[in-house]
Amino acid sequence: MFVAVFVLALALSVSAQYGQQTPAPSACPQGMIVTPAYGTTCYNGGFYFNGVCCSIACPNGQAGTPAVGGVCSTGTSLQNGVCCAGRNASNPLGICEVPEQADGPCPTDGVCVPGYACDAAGVNCCPIQGFDYRNSDCQIGGAIDGLCPTGYVSVFIPDYSTNTCVDLGCVPGVCPQEQRDGPCQNGQCRSGFTCYTPVDICCSSV
């Protein structure tokens, strides 16, 4: 009797140890990360692969989410083809001190010229909230026919009653000068850099 109970206990122990194991999920392709699947559905924009979802990774290593109509939600930006949160968050809030600061209506895709973003009502493109355009160290002089050198944008400053060229580096969140690699090309940058969409500047991904 004792031997039978011992054998039964041993069998149950082995079953508990090995019977519940499942194969480890296969690795996703390089540059992608594993995220949970809901059945066979991937809500994070990834694709179903051997029981898991493989999603494009953001520069911070987290999974990106799909853009809707090519537009990302507030607080995220389009990076590597997906919407990512963090330093490069796009779609920030635009704020106009006076109506003259508006740089035209907010476009259907929600993307204004560098240094500008749609206002809270989604009507006008206004200077990005926190853009330090009043700082004289950020200004290089008046805009000529509304145009400024590369890396600068024209902003109407009420104190001057005219448009002034302001350094896009004074927009909050942009990387330091030594980490920049020039303007983005259609939202893309060379390897090792990511487009900081609010100012259209390539910043180091490291």
Image: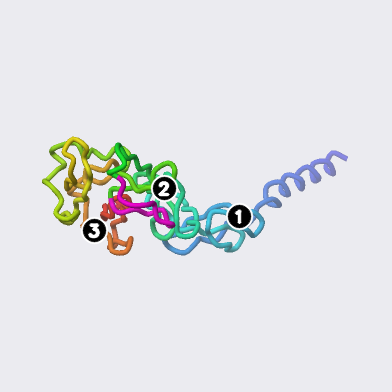
Viewport quadrant of the N terminus: top right
For the point 71% across and 46% down, the residue is 16
Residue 43 screen position, x and y as percent: 58, 54
Asked if labels 1 and 2 touch by Cβ distance under 8 angstroms, the answer is: no
Which label was assigned to residue 198?
none
Residue 70 screen position, x and y as percent: 45, 59
For the point 46% across and 48% down, the residue is 73
Which residues make up the magenta segment? 102-114
For the point 21% across and 56% down, the residue is 181
Q: Dot 2 corresponds to which residue?
A: 123
Q: Dot 3 corresponds to which residue?
A: 183
Residue 118 screen position, x and y as percent: 38, 47
Q: Dot 1 corresponds to which residue?
A: 37
Q: Residues within 10 Å of mark 1 (few under 14, many from 20)?
A: some
Q: Secondary structure at mark 1?
A: loop
Circle 2 or circle 3, nearest the eye: 2
Is residue 177 found left or right of 119 in the rendered image?
A: left
Q: Secondary structure at mark 3?
A: strand
The amino acid on which the numbered mark 1 sits, given as a three-letter code, is Ala
